[in-house]
Image (cartoon, rainbow, N blue to C red):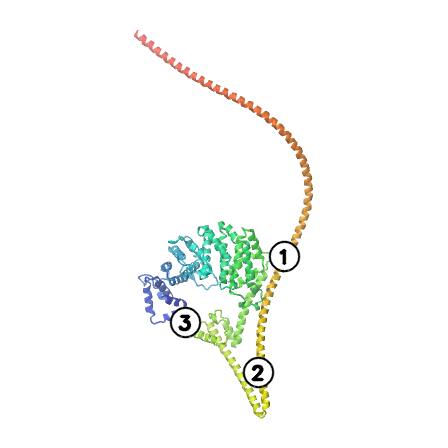
C-alpha cells in the first residue's frame, strides 16, 4: 500500500494507468473496504489513493462502517477526516511511512498550492474552519509530543517539524498552533516539553543530527514559539531555561563558515537562524542584558565583516553585466547574503539599549559594501529575502548622501543581465536550427517544464539518446493526458532538429575532407604515372612528404603547447584581474577612508581653534575669580575671628543659661511638691466634707427617731 501510494503521489502516469486499468472498479471497491481497516497505515494510504484516483468516489465515501455517505473531503465530513489523520499521525511513532504519508496529506489539505506571485502560503478552503474544531488544540499537542518521544535524528522527527513549521507560516493557524504547543504539558515518563525538545534539537551539531536540515527547522520552530510567547506578554524563561537559549544563540552565531565544506550552505543558514532568534529574544526585558553580553558589538562586527569580505557577491555585482556568469557565484553566497540583512535587523533592535551596538548599526549602514548585497537580494532573492532587503533600505535611506543611484544601477544591471542571457540563448537556438520564426515563438512561451533540456545540448551520442528518450516520453504523455504544452513540443523538436542539423554538417564536412583527400590522391597517382621512370624524384617526393608530416606533427604538438600555455595565461590573467579588482576595491575604500579622516581632521582643527579661544576667555575669567577669591578669603578670615569671639560669648551665655535652667528645674520641683501638698489637702477636705455630710445624715436620722419616740411616749401617756 505504501509503495503504491508513493507512486501515485509522484507520478501522474501511474494514476492514468490505474484509471485505465480493467480492474479499476474492483480496486475502488477494495479501497472503500480498507477505510474500516484496523491498521493505521492502510487507512491513511486508502485516503490518499481515494483523493487522487477518482473524484466521484472521493465525494461519496466516508470513514466508518457505512461507506456510501458524504465524502471524506466534503464540507460535512472534513472535520472527521482531519481528526482521523491527526490521530493516525499522533499514534504512529513507530511507523516511518505512516508519518510521512499522513503529514504530507495534512499539508496538502491545509496549504493551498496557489499560483499567485505571493511567496506567503495560503490556507485552503477545506481547512478554513480547522482552528474552530474542538479537537484542534489537543491534536496539535499530540503531534508536538512526538518531538519528545521520537529521535531528533530520525526522518520522522524532521517530517513533524516540517508540518508544524508549515502551520506556523500560515497567518490563520500561527497563533493557535504556537499557543497549543506552548501549553503542552511534559510527556509521560519524561519531564520534557515540545519547546525544550526543539531547543535540544536546535543545539545539535550537523554531525550529530545526520540530516543537517533538522537543527535549522528546529531553530525556526523555536523562534516561532518564543515570538508568540513574548507577544502574549509571557516570559521566555517560563518555557526554556535562560542558559539553554543563550547557549543556543551563542553556538549558532559563532558557527564558522567553511567555504570548501559541503555544509557551507547550512552553516550560513545556521548563523541566520541564530541572529533571527536573537532578535526575538531581544524583546524580552529579562534576557536582554544577558543577550547583549552574548551578541556583543565586536562579534556582530566580525560576522558582518566576514561576509562583506568573503562573499563573492560584491565582486560579482561590481562587474559589468557582460562579464557576469552564473558559475562565478557559489551556491552558498545566496544564503550568505541573508546574514548581513538579519544582523542589521538585530542591531536595529539593540541600538536603543547599547551604545556600541548603535555605533555599529550606523557604521554598517554607511558601509558602501552593503549596497551590492541589497541589490543582489532584491534582484535574485526569494520573497522573504527581498522583503528584508527593502526593510533594510528604509533604514539605509536615513543616512545622509546615501548612494541610492548606485543601488538602482546595480538592480537594473541584474535585469539587463537576465535579458542579455535570454537574448543570447534565443540567438544561439536560432542560428543552430535555422528557423527564426519557430525559435522566437518558442522563446515567448513563459512555461518550459523540461529542466534538463534548458541548455543547448552537445552533439555527442549520450545527448542524442537523452533527447530521443525525452521525445518518446513526451509522445506517450501526449497520448495519455491529451493535454500537451505546445512550447514543450516545439522546443523538444527544435532541439532534435539542432542535433540532426549538427550531425548533417559533420557528415558534410567529412565528405568534403574525403573528396579533397581523394582529389589529392588522384593527382599524386597521375604524377606517379607520368613520372614512373624517375625513381629519384619519387624518393625525394616521399622524403618531402615525410618531412612535411613530421613538421605537421611538430606544429600540432607546438599548437597544443601554445593552447595549454594560453589557457594557463588566461587563468593567470583572470586571477590577476580578480586580484586587481579586489585591490582596486580596497584602494577605493582606503581613499574613502582617507577623505573621511581628512574631514574629521578639519573638524578637529576647528574644534581645537574654538578650544583655544575658550581657553583664553577662561583664563581671563580665572584671573577675575582669583581676585574675588582673595577678597573673599580676607573677608572669611575676619568673619572667622568674629565667629571665634561669638563662640566664646556663646559658651558664656550657655553656662548662664544652664545655671538659669537649674534654678528653673529647682523651682519646678518646688512647685510640683506644692501641687502635691495642695492635692493632698484637697483630698483631706473632700474626705472631711464627706464625713460631715454623713454626720449630718446620722444627726437627721437621730432627730427623726427622737421625734418618733416622743410621739410614741406621748401616745402612751
The residue identified by callout 2 is: 549
Q: Which residue is label 3 attached to?
A: 481
The label nearer to you, 1 versus 2, is 2
Q: Tag 1 or tag 3, which sits nearer the N-term? A: 3
**Is the C-beta separation of discs 3 and 2 under 8 Å?**
no
Res 362 visible: yes
Q: Residues within 10 Å of mark 1 (few under 14, many from 20)?
A: few
- C-alpha separation, residue under disc 1 versus residue under disc 2: 68 Å
At mark 2, the secondary structure is helix
| Depth order, front residue of 306/118 | 306
How far apart, in angstroms, are the residues tagged by discs 3 and 2?
61 Å
Quarter placement of the N terminus: bottom left
N-term-proximal mark, 3 vs 2: 3
- Of the numbered discs 1 and 2, the one sitting upstream in the chain is 2
Q: Name the residue under label 1.
A: 596
Is the residue 551 above or below the residue 176 in the image? below
Residue 182 rendering spot, x and y as whole percentages: 42, 53
Asked whether the residues under the numbered discs 1 and 2 touch, taking CB atoms below 8 Å apart as contact, a structural biologist would say: no
Front label number (3 vs 1) = 1
From mark 3 to mark 1, how far is it between C-alphas?
68 Å
Front disc: 3 or 2: 2
679, above or below 144, in the image: above
Find residue 309 and report its image quarter. bottom right
Q: Residue sitting at 59 percent across and 83 percent down?
A: 548
User: Which x, y percent locates residue 614?
Assistant: 67, 47
Q: From the viewer's perspective, tell me whether residue 413 is left or right of residue 143.
A: right
Secondary structure under tag 3 reads helix
Q: Residue furthest left?
A: 716
Amino acid at each position: 500500500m505504501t509503495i503504491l501510494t508513493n507512486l501515485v503521489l509522484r507520478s501522474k502516469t501511474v494514476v492514468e494507468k490505474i484509471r485505465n486499468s480493467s480492474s479499476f472498479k474492483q480496486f475502488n471497491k477494495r479501497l472503500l473496504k480498507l477505510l474500516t481497516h484496523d491498521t493505521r497505515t492502510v487507512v491513511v494510504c486508502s485516503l490518499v489513493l481515494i483523493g487522487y484516483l477518482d473524484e466521484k468516489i472521493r465525494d461519496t465515501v466516508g470513514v466508518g462502517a457505512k461507506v456510501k455517505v458524504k465524502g471524506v473531503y466534503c464540507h460535512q465530513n472534513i472535520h472527521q477526516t482531519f481528526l482521523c489523520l491527526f490521530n493516525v499521525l499522533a499514534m504512529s511513532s513507530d511507523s516511518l511511512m505512516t508519518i510521512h504519508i499522513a503529514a504530507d496529506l495534512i499539508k496538502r489539505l491545509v496549504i493551498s498550492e496557489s499560483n499567485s506571485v505571493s511567496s506567503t502560503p495560503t490556507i485552503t478552503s477545506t481547512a478554513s474552519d480547522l482552528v474552530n474544531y474542538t479537537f484542534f488544540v489537543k491534536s496539535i499537542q499530540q503531534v508536538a509530543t512526538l518531538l519528545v518521544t521520537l529521535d531528533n535524528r530520525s526522518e520522522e522527527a524532521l517530517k513533524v517539524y516540517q508540518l508544524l513549521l508549515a502551520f506556523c507560516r500560515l497567518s490563520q493557524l500561527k497563533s493557535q498552533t504556537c499557543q497549543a504547543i506552548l501549553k503542552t504539558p511534559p510527556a509521560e515518563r519524561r519531564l520534557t516539553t515540545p519547546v525544550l525538545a526543539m531547543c535540544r534539537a536546535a543545539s545539535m551539531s550537523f554531525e550529530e543530527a545526520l540530516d543537517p536540515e533538522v537543527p535549522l527547522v528546529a531553530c525556526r520552530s523555536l523562534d516561532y514559539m518564543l515570538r508568540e510567547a513574548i507577544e502574549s506578554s509571557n516570559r521566555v524563561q517560563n518555557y526554556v531555561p535562560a542558559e539553554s537559549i543563550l547557549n543556543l544563540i551563542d553556538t549558532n552565531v559563532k558557527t564558522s563558515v567553511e567555504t570548501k565544506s559541503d555544509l557551507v550552505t547550512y552553516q550560513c543558514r545556521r548563523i541566520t537562524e541564530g541572529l533571527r532568534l536573537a532578535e526575538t529574544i531581544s524583546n524580552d526585558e529579562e534576557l536582554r542584558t544577558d543577550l547583549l553580553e552574548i551578541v556583543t558589538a565586536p562579534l556582530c562586527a566580525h560576522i558582518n565583516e566576514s561576509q562583506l569580505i568573503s562573499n563573492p557577491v560584491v565582486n560579482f555585482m561590481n562587474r559589468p553585466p557582460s562579464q557576469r556568469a552564473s558559475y562565478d557565484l557559489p551556491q552558498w553566497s545566496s544564503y550568505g547574503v541573508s546574514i548581513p540583512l538579519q544582523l542589521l535587523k538585530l542591531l536595529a533592535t539593540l541600538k536603543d539599549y547599547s551604545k556600541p551596538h548603535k555605533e555599529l548599526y550606523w557604521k554598517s549602514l554607511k558601509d558602501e559594501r552593503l549596497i551590492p548585497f541589497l541589490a543582489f537580494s532584491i534582484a535574485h532573492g526569494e520573497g522573504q529575502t527581498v522583503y528584508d532587503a527593502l526593510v533594510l533600505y528604509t533604514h539605509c535611506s536615513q543616512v545622509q548622501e546615501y548612494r541610492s543611484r548606485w543601488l538602482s544601477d546595480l538592480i537594473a544591471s541584474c535585469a539587463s543581465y537576465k535579458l542579455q542571457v535570454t537574448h543570447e540563448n534565443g540567438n544561439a537556438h536560432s542560428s543552430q536550427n535555422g528557423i527564426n520564426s519557430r525559435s522566437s515563438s518558442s522563446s515567448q512561451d513563459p512555461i518550459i517544464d523540461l529542466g534538463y533540456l534548458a541548455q543547448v545540448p552537445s552533439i555527442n551520442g549520450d545527448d542524442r539518446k537523452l533527447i530521443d528518450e525525452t521525445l518518446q516520453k513526451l509522445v506517450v504523455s501526449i497520448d495519455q493526458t491529451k493535454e500537451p504544452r505546445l512550447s514543450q513540443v516545439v522546443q523538444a523538436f527544435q532541439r532534435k532538429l539542432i542535433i540532426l542539423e549538427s550531425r548533417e554538417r559533420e557528415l558534410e564536412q567529412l565528405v568534403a575532407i574525403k573528396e579533397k583527400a581523394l582529389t589529392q590522391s588522384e593527382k599524386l597517382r597521375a604524377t606517379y604515372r607520368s613520372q614512373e621512370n624517375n625513381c629519384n624524384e619519387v624518393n625525394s617526393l616521399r622524403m618531402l612528404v615525410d618531412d612535411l608530416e613530421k613538421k605537421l606533427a611538430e606544429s600540432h604538438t607546438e599548437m597544443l603547447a601554445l593552447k595549454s600555455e594560453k589557457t594557463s595565461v588566461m587563468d593567470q590573467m583572470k586571477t590577476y584581474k580578480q586580484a586587481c579588482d579586489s585591490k582596486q576595491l580596497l584602494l577605493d575604500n582606503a581613499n574613502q577612508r582617507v577623505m573621511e579622516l581628512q574631514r574629521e581632521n578639519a573638524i578637529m582643527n576647528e574644534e581645537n581653534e574654538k578650544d583655544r579661544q575658550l581657553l583664553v576667555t577662561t583664563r581671563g575669567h580665572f584671573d577675575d575669580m582669583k581676585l574675588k577669591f582673595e577678597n573673599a578669603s580676607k573677608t572669611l578670615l575676619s568673619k572667622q575671628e568674629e565667629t571665634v569671639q561669638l563662640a566664646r560669648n556663646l559658651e558664656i551665655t550657655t553656662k548662664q543659661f544652664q545655671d538659669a535652667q537649674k534654678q528653673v528645674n529647682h523651682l519646678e520641683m518646688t512647685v510640683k511638691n506644692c501641687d502635691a501638698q495642695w492635692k493632698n489637702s484637697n483630698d483631706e477636705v473632700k474626705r472631711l466634707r464627706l464625713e460631715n455630710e454623713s454626720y449630718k445624715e446620722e444627726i437627721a436620722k437621730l432627730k427623726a427617731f427622737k421625734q418618733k419616740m416622743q410621739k410614741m411616749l406621748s401616745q402612751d401617756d
